[in-house]
Image: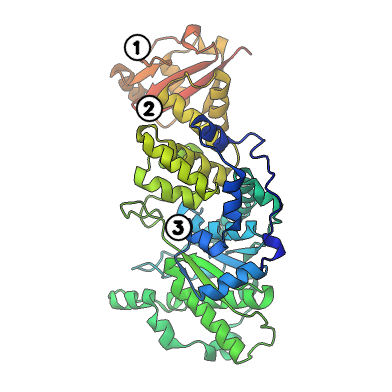
Amino acid sequence: MKVEILQVGTLSCQLFKRRNSTLQILTKYGIDVTPEDCRRDLDDPILNHLKKRGLLSQCTHEPELSQLCSKRRLSLYCGADPSARSLHIGNLLPLMILLHFNLRGHNIFPIVGGATGKVGDPSGRETERTEIQHEERESNVENIRKQMKSFFRKGVTFAHRRNQLFKDVEPGTQMLKNNIEWWENIRILDFLSTYGKFIKVNQMLARESIKKRLNSGMGIGFNEFTYQILQAFDFFVLYKDYNVQIQVGGNDQYGNIVAGIDLISRLHRNKADNAVHAPGAFGITVPLLTTSTGEKFGKSAGNAVFIDKYMTPSYQLYQSMINLSDGDVERFLNKFSLLPLSVIDKIVLKHKQNKKQRIGQKILAVELCDLIHGQGEGISNLIISETLFGGFHNFNTLEILEAFRKQGLLKTYKACMIENLSILNVLEDIYRQQKSRTELKKLIKGGSVSLGVKNTRIFDSDLRIKPDDALDGKLILIRVGKKDYHVIEVTSE
């Protein structure tokens, strides 16, 4: 029996009528999206679908949870501590699970760890976390709160443009919380007297993250040792007050998630709190985000791709996906795109027919930029990339200028002004305090600076830029070194 929230209406959907950057690329390469493709994803049981996308690694009591998913509206949560100013793309995997559930009518609770962030999670770490000052931590909390809110709001729109049958399903609610809301009023003696007897130290010592630290010689502080209690209690509060039955986290969170399920079970079994009514608690974990060679994406690996535009510019995010190996394309598309799985199969097949075109990487890069930063981000970055590395023949001048403007990579000069400036003056204006006048002169003299779409090398620092250096009288391209490009818009006023 299917519950009403999973009934998605008719097959008569007119796909992608509105401008869609991914559709533009799919159309270019002859890849179609049919109603059957869309229907197949929606008809697939949610847990099975998440497995196919490589998002589900472990699930407690899976048969029971699978039945519940098809029978009733559930609530689930995942948390993120403010250990950095921004989430990175590895943090998005549990959020993707929440988004998939939310699109199918289930309620989600993204949690910012304003309280747990004061302590620090030892999971997956061999050393103690560096303490963050209060002001910085509070700033991180606010940044991550905004990122989570934006991600799920944009995520629904993103999904509707990839599979319009999602429009026939009313999404569940999205309730963002900060765990400081319940922790700030709890006194330690009250907590120990009420809940301490239900927390077993032998089980805490048995957690893999704790054993590793105890055996490392570094030991573990009491603060980090008790982190699993804090996370377990978060689950209990959400379970009791908001009927949240599922916690989602990374594989390294499995022990903490099980600790929460155990605490809920003990409290429910002993009727320590009469408010507990939910029929069960479950845990889902996602795999760590790695490349095909096993390399991790994240802060600890030193290669984090942040979702904050100021930390990882949108164009840099695009390029990081373009540079992925062919072996990563299918896995990353399955995880981060909401295109139907059968469409992703078509993309991968087309990609394998001519890997030099990097079709899979281009679609992945556009998808991830649109998912994180909003509709249109991907296509603007594609235009920039294709223009810089593939030539100016694929797009008109206005499209190119608009793409660079959208990414904040465009500098504007009046025609009468630029005619009176030397190439050195222009570069000084572009680089400001990043490069000295002497450095720039050396680059020009060494032939590292080129001008125009034909990449004409410049050796004279006093050379004046002429009107005919501008493409269509509007666009000037300056290249410094092999990869540093600057686009200038020339205006008449």
**Left or right of 206 on screen, residue 372:** right
- Alpha carbon distance from label 2 to label 1: 17 Å
Please identify the quarter of the rendering in which residue 33 is found: top right
User: Where, quadrant-wise, is the C terminus in this rendering?
Assistant: top right
Q: Is mark 3 on a helix, strand or loop?
A: loop
Mark 2 closeness class: few <14, some 14–19, many ≥20 residues within 10 Å: few
In front: label 1 or label 3: 3
Q: Position of residue 461 (x, y in %)?
A: 37, 14
Q: Please, what is the three-letter code of the amino acid marked with disc 1?
A: Asp
Q: What residue type is labelled 3?
A: Gly
- Picture coordinates of residue 218, whole percent (x, y): 30, 73
In this rendering, the answer to whether 459 lies above or below 327 is above
- Which residue corresponds to the image point at 43% horizontal and 85% vertical from the top-left? 203
Which tag, 2 or 1, sits closer to the chain's start? 2
* Residue 173 appears in the figure: no
Q: Name the residue under label 2.
A: 436
Q: Mark 3 points at which residue?
A: 54
